[in-house]
Image: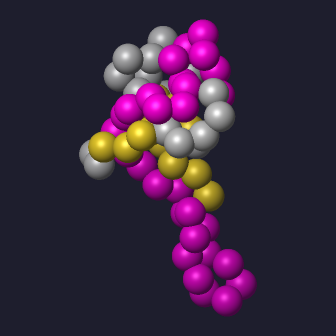
Amino acid sequence: GMPVVLRHTNICTELGITNGATGFLRKLNTCIDDNGLTYCTSALVEFPDSKVHLSNLPPCYFPI
C-alpha cells in the first residue's frame, strides 16, 4: 500500500497512533451519494510500529 503519515492530533499515544506516525494505506471505504458521486468514508491504515489489535482487523490495522 501507499505510505502515509498521520497528520492529526494524537489519537492514542499508548497504542502508537500519534501525530507523525507512519503507516501504509491498506483499504479505502467508499459510498455513493444520491448524485452518483463516490466519496471516501474511512481509510484502513496499517501502522507497523503500533500496538493496535482491534477485533475483526489484522494486527496493527487502524481505521481513520
Q: Residue at x 53, y 56 (%)?
A: 29
Query: From the viewer's perspective, is 27 left or right of 33?
Result: left
Residue 39 position (above or below residue 61): below
In the depicted view, which residue is nearer to us: 25 or 27? 25
- In percent of width and height, residue 16 lies at 51, 17
Residue drawn at 63 percent across, 27 percent down: 10
Q: Quadrant of residue 30?
A: bottom right
Which residues fall within the magenta stretch? 11-40
Disc tally is: 0
Q: Is residue 20 above or below residue 30?
A: above
The answer to if 12 sits in the magenta stretch is: yes
* Nearer to me, 16 or 7: 7
Quarter of the view holding residue 41? bottom right
Q: Is residue 63 visible?
A: yes
Residue 26, given in percent of the width and then of the height, sits at 37, 44
* Horizontal arrangement in the rendering, residue 9 relative to residue 26 (left or right): right
Q: Is residue 64 left or right of residue 50?
A: right
Q: Is residue 33 magenta?
A: yes
How has the structure been colored for display? secondary structure
| Quarter location, residue 23 | top left
- The quarter of the image holding the C terminus is top right
Q: Quadrant of the N terminus?
A: top left
Is residue 58 visible in the rendered image? The answer is: no
Counting from the top left corner in percent of width and height, residue 40 is at: 56, 63
- Position of 17 with respect to 9 (left or right) is left
Residue situated in front as seen by the camera: 35 or 12: 12
Give the residue at the far right of this rendering.
Answer: 34
Residue 4, position as x, y percentages in the image: 38, 43
Q: Residue at x 67, y 89 (%)?
A: 35
